[in-house]
Amino acid sequence: MSMPAAERETVITGNDADRTYRVWTAERRMVTAFKKKAHRFDEWKTYEVEGSEVFEGVISADNFNPASGVKRQVSEEQRQVMAERARERFTA
């Protein structure tokens, strides 16, 4: 039997001193989302609590924004392509 819905939560704590965020979640949707982006975390693990999968990880503040989640990494080439596309779209 899995955790009751009211107990499946997401907790994100930040620390200005070492500029990291600690993430703990038992929400199924968030576990899946964080596992897909686990390569961006400095350290992470999944385990089971009361039959529910849990994701726990530490991520640098450079790679995470608590309002929007894991930041997207864009290469210089991708940035140039996006800038050119924006110029074409918004200056026409």
Image (spheres, helix red, strand yellow):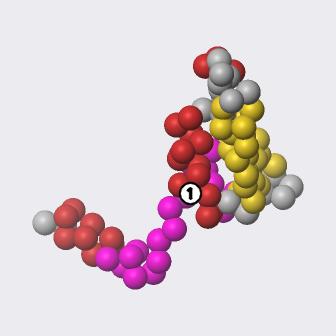
Residue 7: % across, % down: 69, 21
Is 58 situated above or below 62?
A: above
Residue 19 falls in image quadrant: bottom right
Q: Is residue 19 visible?
A: yes
Q: How many marks?
A: 1
Name the residue located 70 percent from the left edge and 47 percent from the top edge. Answer: 46
Q: Is residue 36 located in the magenta-colored stretch of the structure?
A: no
Residue 1: % across, % down: 65, 22
According to the picture, the residue beneath numbered tag 1 turns out to be 37
| SS assignment at label 1 | loop
Single out the residue that lies furthest toward the right: 17
Q: Is residue 34 left or right of residue 61?
A: left
Q: Is residue 79 left or right of residue 54?
A: left
Mark 1 Cα-neighbour bin, 10 Å: few <14, some 14–19, many ≥20: few
Residue 51: % across, % down: 68, 30
Question: From which residue to which does the magenta span run?
Answer: 60-81
Q: Is residue 32 left or right of residue 61?
A: left
Single out the residue that lies furthest toward the bottom: 77
Is 51 situated above or below 63?
A: above
Name the residue located 62 percent from the left edge and 44 percent from the top edge. Answer: 66
Single out the residue that lies furthest toward the left: 92
Q: Is residue 80 left or right of residue 35?
A: left
Residue 84: % across, % down: 27, 75
Q: Toward the viewer: 38 or 81?
A: 38
Name which residue type carries label 1.
Lys
Name the residue located 73 percent from the left edge and 63 percent from the top edge. Answer: 42
Name the residue located 47 percent from the left edge and 71 percent from the top edge. Answer: 74
Quadrant of the snapshot with the C terminus:
bottom left
Residue 12 falls in image quadrant: top right
